[in-house]
Structure formats: C-alpha cells, structure tokens
Amino acid sequence: MLAKVWSAATLGIDAVRIVIEVDSGGHSAQPGFVLVGLPDTAVREAYARIRSALHSCGFWIPPRHITVNLSPADVKKEGSGYDLPIAIGILHACDFLSDVQVAGRVFVGELSLDGTLAPVRGALSISAAFACDPAVREVIVPASNANEAAAVESVRVIGARSLPSLLAHLRGDALIPAAASMAFVAEEVDDADFAEVRGQAVAKRALEVAAAGGHNVMMIGPPGSGKTMLAKRLATILPRLSLDEAIVTTKIHSVAGTLPAGSGLLTRRPFRAPHHTISTYGLVGGGTSPRPGEVSLAHYGVLFLDELAEFRRETLEVMRQPMEDGVVTIARASRTVTFPARFTLAGALNPCPCGFYNDASGRRSCKCTPQQIARYLARISGPLLDRIDMQVEVAALRSEEIMSMESGESSASIRERVEAARAVQRDRFRRTRVQSNTAMSSRHLRRFCELDASSRRLLLGAIERLGLSARAHDRILKVSRTIADLAGVERIESGHVAEAVQYRALDRAYFQGG
C-alpha cells in the first residue's frame, strides 16, 4: 500500500512542505527498509528510532520491504523532525491508520526510543508556512513546541507528548486540545538601568541617539570607564518589540535552536554579546547546513562586541555586508539561504593595548609605542569604521563621580523619548520599507535631510578637516536627522549637524592609519 503524509522542512527562517511517501511493498517482497530523497545522517538514522518507538508502543510491523521517499527530492532533508511523519506513514501503509485519519494534517517531531516526542527546530516557521492553506486542518508538533507554533493564530496546533496519545487523537478516541494562542505582550528589558551609571553624560546621550535612529555606535576609552556597563543598558532604552518583529525574531531563534523549550514568542529585544574568539561562521552564520549566526540572532536587537580590536580582522570584515544590507546571504553548492540581520551594533575597545592612551584622568600613563597603537587599532579597517555611525570617547571617571551615590536618569524616561522619535520615523517612512533613520537610502537623504546654508558649510568643513568618505557623510546626515527627531523639529539645524559631526571626531584622533 502507498501512503502519503505531510511534513515540512525549514529553509532559512521559512518552511516548505515535504511529502513523505511510504510504500509497504507487500508480504512477497524481501523485508528491508530504503530511505531516499536527499536525507542527511540524522534522517537516515530515523528508522532505528522509529522501529524501537513502535515496538515500545506495542506495534508489530509486518516483515515487508518499506520504501520511504521524501519529496521534493532536490531539497536537502536535515534533522530528526521527520521521525514522526515517517512513523505515521509506515502505520498508514501497514493499515494501522486510515486516509481520513492522516489527511489534512502536518506532522513534525523527533521520536525517542520509548515513543515520547522530543522538540524540534523551526516549529513557528512550519506553522506559519501553512497559515493560509485551507487544506491543512491541523499542524501536529511535540508538546514542547506547541506554544511556539500556536503563535500563528490561523493554524490549529496540536501538541502531542507521545506516539500513543497522538494515535488516540487521530482515531478520535481521546482528542488532544488545540494549543491556545497566547496574547502577545512585549516586555521591557529591566535587568539593568541607566540610573545606575555614574557620570558619562556624553556617552549616555550618544546611546540615546543610537537607540532613537537604530545607529551603530562604538565606544572607546580606558579600562573601567564604563563602556561595557553602558552597552548592556542600550537594550533597555530600545522601543518595545512589535508583534511582527517578535514573530521574525522568534523564527530565527527557533531555527538556530536557541529558543527555550516550551516558550512562545520572544517578548524582549535580543542582546547578544559573543566572545572575541568567535569564528566567522559563529558571527555571521554558515556551515554545511547553514544556521543563523550572532548577527542574525541579534536581529531587531543589540549586537555587543566587547574588546572590538581583539576580534580577528577577517571575522569583523564579514560584518560589512550585513551592516549595510540588513541581511546575511550564505551560498552553498546545494542552496542559497538568506537570514535577516538588522541589528544595532555596539562596540567597545581600549585606545591601545595597555588601555591608557589619551587617558585624561592622568592616573595611569600609556606604555605603548606609536607603532603598537597603530597595529592595535588597524585591526578595525576603514571600511568597517565607515559603517559605524557614531564614535564616542568614554573618559575615565573622576574621583568624585566614582564616589557619588546619586542616581542618573532612568532607562524608562530615556525610552519615552526614543519611542517618540521612532513614532516620527514610522510616520515619515509609512509608505516605504524603511523602519528607522539608519536604513535611509540616498533618495531618502535628499528628501528628508535637506540642510540650510550654515549647516552645509559646517558639514563641508568637517569633511575636509576629518577626511571623511561619502559613506561617512551620509552617516552624519542620518544621525543629524535622528537628533532633530529627538528635538521634535522637522528641519535639521546646524546644532544637530554639529553634534553628529562630534560623533565622528575619533576618525582623526585614533584611526589615521586604519
């Protein structure tokens, strides 16, 4: 008998339908098992798990020659999520299940040897892929994935804990209730607060501007000046996640396998802080079976690179395209996969190997030679520096600031101004795909960043004095636009341009030879 069962495969952060075709071959054929359709090692091992699980659940499979085809054959089948649909297909082909009990249902799940269902990656992507398909009546996933998959309200999701309970559901003996779609409520990141930061008014202001416009920011200063503390609080002043942003973010983390078991949609903006020893694949994604890297896991959130100059230069360079385009495209011989990567980069580094070059406090003197400083900072190339909108010098705290017990402005009050500026940008770009000032194209710059005569003279002088590139010029205009939005004015003024230029001053101070 020939049986057909629906399943799904993830490609990037989206999913496509896979049809599991099972031919039981009849009693006269030589007993055996053949699996075709471009399976990887985990899929090829499925029959051993399935056979043990079926035996544990009391099923005896007749000695037949079973052929399983995973269609379409040109799509690479990866992972253990095909265990359940293949098992259902075998039971259907051996007349333990009928057409009516299997038709219109999508099955995804890994089988343990005792018949329990283990979680899989990409459950949200799979349920979203069938959201508009009237032929699909249920998407059946492991119970641990039910909350995640049920975030798509237009799909009926069944979370099964074991193969026997699922079979009872399919036969109508003991129905499993559909997973309820949980109401989405975005949470604020409250693990840290800007009120805890002493001093550093300039750096706080810069991070507010960065959050308001989605700009990349780099902080440079001696050890202990508060760079890491400031960066960890950047996520606390970003706007709350929208539902659409939460769905995309959750898809990425689900496909990557970083979503906690049993969780639904992510409700906070991501904050990723990889160590400087991370590989290129770990940062931007890749591998034989492409997976999202840190730049994609930080999508709609913050990617914090501490000790920026300690990262391998070739690793940092691969970020240039994602920072410009907001996506990562990974090409392999079998397929090309694209992952979203629209993140806010926050970098922190010391000004030299010892950390005390240009230390205004005078408490420690720099021991590095000019050649050592140049080599250290040369790890950050000019093209990469051009893509960092804002450069902020974080000076060492004064003695009275270190001893101060006064609280600064809270993250909540800063976030109110940031959200007001983002609301202005949403209204400005409502007929485009642009979501924030940092993503403006040249056409948008000409339309929304017009300068008066005094502002043009100021910017022209900065370009000549600092030797800025055309890309750096555009970045200054974008930051100026954000500063004007925070001020609540429509026209960019010379003061806004002057502040934006101030955030490029380190180009000359530190990176003459970058």
Image (spheres, rainbow, N blue to C red):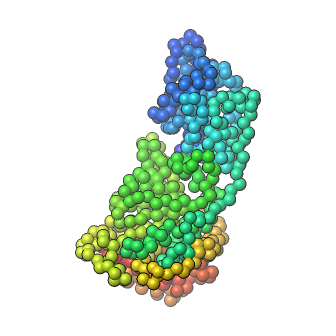
Residue 426, located in which quarter of the rendered image? bottom right
Looking at the picture, how far across and down is residue 400, in whole percent?
45, 84
Q: Is residue 164 visible?
A: yes
Residue 191, located in which quarter of the rendered image? bottom right
**Residue at (59% x, 64% y) in the render:** 189
Nearest to the observer: residue 313 or residue 73: 313
Looking at the picture, how far across and down is residue 338, in whole percent?
50, 51
Screen quadrant of the C terminus: bottom left
Screen quadrant of the N terminus: top right
Looking at the picture, how far across and down is residue 103, in whole percent?
69, 31
**Residue at (52% x, 79% y) in the render:** 405
Position of 197 relative to 54 (above/below): below
**Residue at (45% x, 43% y) in the render:** 289
Q: Is residue 341 visible?
A: no
Looking at the picture, how far across and down is residue 409, in whole percent?
58, 78
Position of 170 relative to 383 (above/below): above
Residue 387, located in which quarter of the rendered image? bottom left
Nearest to the observer: residue 216 or residue 205: 205
**Residue at (55% x, 43% y) in the render:** 121
